[in-house]
Amino acid sequence: MQPIFHSIAVIGKYQKSRANAAPQTLCQAVRNIAAFVRAQGCEVTLDEETAGSIQLTDYATRDLDDIGRHCDLGLVIGGDGTMLSVGRRLASHGTPLIGINQGRLGFITDIPLEGFEATLAPMLVGDYEEDVRPLMHVLPDEGEVAIELLSGREASANFDMQSLAQLKQGDRVVVQRSPYSACFLHPVGWSYFATLRNKLRWNEGA
């Protein structure tokens, strides 16, 4: 069967070291995944920051907004924090994402990096579960929920494991539902709670 996705972006978690280079594990992961996707007959694009951090010049590059406008699918290499961050950036474009787990726990990046080919291949031809998640806007004014820091210590606002801002007494945060949703694709049979149970080893030995 032919892939249902024509143009696929590969996006990595780019945290540079002091030597200004990405970890070798990420470099090899991006190379392997990009080569596999190209071998399936798909056009491959690299996120420009990922490509720059691993110094890979074999593929076209785009920034995330351009990826949203031109690519059918994004493959995100990293952990759930990376997946959620990219999901928010691409939600307005409706670009679906598949996560390949390079973090400690992958509840939505649920494809192990080792042996990813066996899971990814059927997904590229349409064998997947779709997980659509509404987003929230955090606004300085009007909205559905308002949170005001009245007294006590300073606080910080965090959403989906991403730090938003440091707050002081008198600051006000308004949260409103976004018109956009993030779309994550998972292997057939995927269940968030089954993933949670397996990774946290619930009922182990029972």
Image (spheres, rainbow, N blue to C red):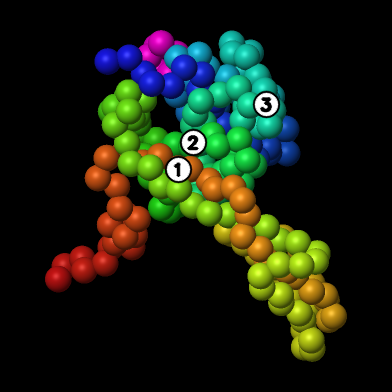
Circle 1 sits on which residue?
184
Q: Judge left or right: residue 86 versus residue 122.
A: right
**Percent x, y for residue 155?**
74, 75
Which residue is nearer to you in this view: 172 or 110?
A: 172
Q: Which mark is residue 101?
A: none
Label 2 near label 1: C-beta < 8 Å?
Answer: yes
Q: Give the dominant element type of the magenta stretch: helix, strand or loop.
A: helix
| CA neighbours of label 1 inside 10 A, class few (<14), some (14 to 19), many (20+) | many
**Percent x, y for residue 53?**
67, 28
Q: Residue at x 27, y 40 (%)?
A: 188
Q: Residue at x 59, y 13 (%)?
A: 59
Circle 2 sits on which residue?
96
Q: Judge left or right: residue 180 versus residue 130.
A: right
User: Mark 2 to mark 3: distance in Å?
Assistant: 14 Å
Compare marks 1 and 2 and give the one earlier in the sequence.
Answer: 2
Q: Does the stretch in magenta take in 78?
A: no
| CA neighbours of label 2 inside 10 A, class few (<14), some (14 to 19), many (20+) | many
**Percent x, y for residue 38?**
45, 13
Q: Residue at x 76, y 62 (%)?
A: 139
Q: Does the stretch in magenta take in 37?
A: yes
- Magenta region: which residues? 36-41
Q: Judge left or right: residue 20 versus residue 12.
A: right
Label 1 near label 3: C-beta < 8 Å?
Answer: no
Tell me the element at label 2. loop
Q: Residue at x 73, y 39 (%)?
A: 18
Residue type (three-letter) at the residue carrying disc 3: Asp
- Residue 51 visible? The answer is no
Circle 3 sits on which residue?
66
